[in-house]
Amino acid sequence: MAFNRSDAGLGSWRIISSAEEPVTRRLRHRLPWLALGLAGAMLSAWIVSSAEDEIARNVALAFFMPAIVYMADAVGTQTEVLVVRSLSAGIPLRDFFFKEVLAGVLIGVLIAAAFYPFCFVLYDRASLALTVSLALFVSSAMAGTIALLLPWLLMRTGADPAFGSGPLATVVQDLLSIVIYLALATAIM
């Protein structure tokens, strides 16, 4: 399903089947968001390369970067789906905002708690396990909040949250997760 602006005014959406939308419109709606994601991927490569010395001193840091980025994206994607679905049903953000923020924080705590012993047993380095676990906690918790706000902001500005939320939230979450992880690694390790 896609959300299209109707002539009824700001904030009004009508849901149409994806089967009804021509390929040219699909591309026009999707490619700008994906181009933004590609730019974010380039920026993330630059950020990681700027931490080359820290990663070279602690090669194991590189092993966990995909897990941290993935978990933030997974938490964010779950929240995005709930938000877009709720907004399309006319449920105001204020009705579920704090519950979702709390859920994101609790998910982050649980993921970090589950990952710490795994990392510690695997590498026998408390500083590495702490760094990875804290990065998982912070990135998962902030991913939920980002995923709450972006669809709402897109809808408020007239953009279709179904197209923009995923790519935009993903690039923001990826960049923040990498920055958080590398900052924690520099501070702790």
Image (cartoon, rainbow, N blue to C red):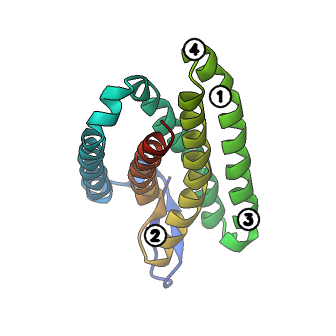
Q: Quadrant of residue 91?
A: bottom right
103 with respect to 157 (left or right):
right
Along the polypeptide, which appears first: circle 2 or circle 1? 1
Q: What separation in Å lies between label 2 and label 1 (alpha carbons)?
A: 36 Å
State how far apart marks 3 and 4 are (Cα).
36 Å
Q: How far apart are marks 2 and 3 (CA)?
A: 19 Å
Q: Residue 98 carries which label?
A: 3
User: Which residue, given by chain and number where applicable, does mark 2 sit on?
Assistant: 154
Q: Identify which amino acid the numbered label 2 is placed on.
A: Leu
Q: Seen from this angle, which residue lies furthest bottom?
A: 9
Instruction: In this rendered view, identify the residue nearer to me: 135 or 10.
Output: 135
Q: Is residue 152 visible?
A: yes
| Looking at the image, residue 184 lies above or below residue 17 | above
Depth-wise, is mark 2 or mark 1 nearer the camera?
A: 1
Front residue of 126/169: it is: 126
Question: What number is the disc on residue 40?
Answer: none
**Mark 2 or 4, nearer chain start:** 4
- SS category of the residue bearing label 3: helix
Q: Mark 4 points at which residue?
A: 122
- Residue 11 against residue 67 in the figure, above or below: below
Taking 175 as reference, is 123 left or right? right
SS at circle 2? helix
Residue 112 in the figure: left or right of residue 72: right
- Secondary structure under the numbered disc 1 in the rendered image: helix
Labels 4 and 1: the sequence-earlier one: 1
Regarding residue 80, the answer to whether it shows in the image is no
